[in-house]
Image (cartoon, rainbow, N blue to C red):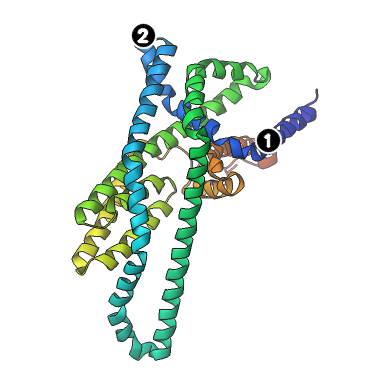
Amino acid sequence: MTYQQRAWAWAIGLTVFLLLLYLLRGVMLPFVAGMAVAYFLDPACDWLEKKGSSRMVATTFITAGFFLVASLLLVLLAPLAFGQIVELFEKIPDYTAAVREKIAPLLAWLEPYIGKDGVAELLQTIKASTGDAVKWLARLAGGLVNQLEALANLMSLLVITPIVSFYLLRDWDHLVAKVDSWLPRAHVETIREQFREIDRTLAGFVRGQVTVCVILGCFYGIGLSLVGLDFGFIIGFGTGLVSFVPFFGMLAGFVVGMGLAIAQFDSWLFVGLVAAVFLVGQIIEGNFLTPKMVGERVGLHAVWVIFALLACGALFGFVGILLAVPVAAVVGVLVRFAMGRYLESPLYLADGPPPDRDGGEGGG
């Protein structure tokens, strides 16, 4: 088989794989979630094995413990979260009226500058924007409820995911060895190196980012609750959980939290305290949590992560969101590898002098 034929074979195989993934996206969620859990827990199983435990015992203990803790958290937090979300939607009209009442002095101050027509137009804009936001939140909540009902009816995520996680975790080393045996022998070391780089990137980003999100969620939730913000724990914990989307998670939580604070509190001191919670959270994340637990060496730029989440989510739904970061890591590693080869190739050098360390051309 020629090089061109091998390239076509790999391209066709990748195309078929992506097509099947797209066609089967409706049933892929428990399997993708199970694979993610197994990948996340594999280091714990390896550690127990090094301590003398068998793989079966380690897998059973780790899997059972993980899903037991997850189930307990779900049972304890889900009713509270659902109740507060329902109550929040019920109070949105009251909060909207309170915000309009509080901005009335500001509009009165602006009237000499923009006129009555300008004030009326601004009020209409605020009213329309508020109405659109409420409708969007209602549609989002309705969609989430429908999806949760479908998941509850099928029980696929709650039943199949632990089974998939257990078997993948038990056979993880054997699966890795089997895939390794399928690699083209002529390029096996190069491919292994790229897989190690992908694993390092995913381990640094996913495992570290999950820890950062949980810590931030607890910090925001407890901080906003202590300030006295209504639904502070739900807003704060939700802000932390969606912080895996760079900038968007914190920004969304900040906008919701500040809007609610302005509507709820009569004193600007408490509004400032709510803002201070988010500010301190960002300082802690940017200077301590992310550098220590994620690091700067993972090679996943924030813009690239956002694009991957949006693109994969649009194509594959929630399954795509789960796959977005692994896909971003794989593509990022492959692009860096390809660029390294290109910069060493005659196509780039073109018989000219190689660049010096400062980025300019080397002298003769």
Amino acid tagged 1: Leu
Q: Nearer the viewer, mark 1 or mark 2?
A: 1
Dividing the picture into quadrants, the one containing residue 6 is top right
**Residue in the image at 55% along x and 27% along y:** 195
Which residue is rendered at x = 39% and y = 38% of the image?
210
Q: Position of residue 339 (x, y in %)?
A: 60, 39
Q: Residues within 10 Å of mark 2 (few under 14, many from 20)?
A: few
Circle 1 Cα neighbour tier, 10 Å, few/some/many (<14 / 14–19 / ≥20): few
* Front one among 143 and 316: 143
Can you see residue 339?
no
At a point 37% along the width and 55% down the height, the residue shown is 86
The first of marks 1 and 2 along the sequence is: 1
User: Which residue is labeled 1 in the image?
Assistant: 20
Q: Amino acid at mark 2?
A: Gly
Label 1 vs label 2: CA separation?
41 Å
What residue appears at the point 37 percent right and 12 percent down from the top-left corner?
50
Query: Which residue in the structure is indicated by mark 2?
Result: 52
Q: Secondary structure at mark 1?
A: helix
Q: Nearer the viewer, residue 143 or 224?
A: 143
221 lies left or right of 199: left
Q: Position of residue 250 (x, y in %)?
A: 37, 53
Mark seen at residue 44: none
361 in relation to 256, above or below: above
User: Which percent across, then down, holds residue 55?
Assistant: 44, 12
Quadrant where the image shows the C terminus:
top right
Q: Quadrant of the N terminus?
A: top right
Examine the rendered structure and indicate whether residue 49 appears above or below residue 266: above
